[in-house]
Amino acid sequence: MKKLIIQHIKNCKLKKTIIAIAIALAVSKGTYAQTGMPEMAKMNKDSIPDKKQAGMDMNNSMATMVHPFFTHMGMPHKTGTYNLRFAVFSTQIDKKSEADFALQFETGLTKFMGLHLVLQSDKTEIMFQFAGLKSKNGMNAFSPLIEFEIPTHEGIYTQIGFASTLSNTRVAFHQVLHYGLREKNFEGGTAVVYRLSNNIFLVTEVLGEKKQDEQAIVNLLAGFKIRVKSYLLLGLGIQFPITANRDFSSQFVFQPDLQLKN
């Protein structure tokens, strides 16, 4: 009888121990679920980048950084960024072909001022572009500018003007207008850059000049640029006049576009 009583007591103690362990496990599991799991889920959610936002940022950069062939963009370059475009021309004049070139270089000098150099066979242009208005996302801007044109055998011509850009993740519209203080002439251009894909861009430009006592000259350019490296694009286009007053009958343009930054 004594042995049965002792065995009963041991069984009771074992049951109580098992029940206590089960309760402890249930409580700890509930506490972990209420405190640990949501925090881990939140941490994981916060640590995963927003793919959609990342894609938009990439598209924004591409839409604003791909230059037209000749039209200025509406904002100066940032300091530490550089753009070099070397254009080779094949121009048809009275059924004859002539070859020429143009070298364009852009960079940022300060936070509010950029430099744009254009070197051609007959002249050199030095332009300073000033940051005027700019949207928060950096895709829309307006900037005044001043340009000094140095002909090979003549004096320095000064031009003043402005440039602007309106863009989104798919298309960018650029515009520039110059006024020559000495020649009293207008030069300008508009360009549309359409992002067909992350590496292919369609470019259309209208370029014109109006000299005093002369009819205006307006040319239309159509082409495309292909990104072959993250820092290099290759552009090919054709330009032809759409007015009676003209400098050539047609012109082919091949332009490597090099983008660098520190």
Image (tube, grey):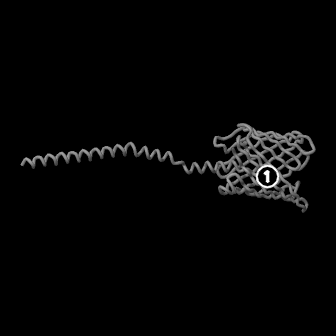
Q: Is residue 153 above or below residue 203?
A: above
Residue 251: x %, y % from top left: 83, 58
Q: Secondary structure at mark 1?
A: strand
Q: Residue 169 versus residue 230: which sits nearer the camera?
A: 230
Q: What residue do we see at 77% from left, 51% from top?
A: 85
Residue 122: x %, y % from top left: 89, 48
Q: What residue do we see at 89% from left, 59% from top?
A: 93
Label 1: how many Cα within 10 Å (few below 14, some 14–19, many 20+): some
Q: Is residue 204 above or below residue 133?
A: below
Q: Is residue 209 left or right of residue 11?
A: right
Q: Is residue 101 left or right of residue 228?
A: right
Q: Is residue 231 left or right of residue 212?
A: left
* Quadrant housing residue 154: top right
What residue is pinned by disc 1? Answer: 86
Q: What residue do we see at 80% from left, 58% from top?
A: 238
Residue type at mark 1 is: Phe
Residue 217: x %, y % from top left: 86, 51
> Which residue is situated farthest in the right direction here?
153
Q: What residue do we see at 65% from left, 55% from top?
A: 198
Residue 102: x %, y % from top left: 82, 51
Q: Residue 64 versus residue 144: which sits nearer the camera?
A: 64
> Which residue is situated farthest in the bottom direction here?
95
Q: Is residue 96 above or below residue 132?
A: below
Quarter holding the C terminus is top right
> Which residue is situated farthest in the left direction here?
1
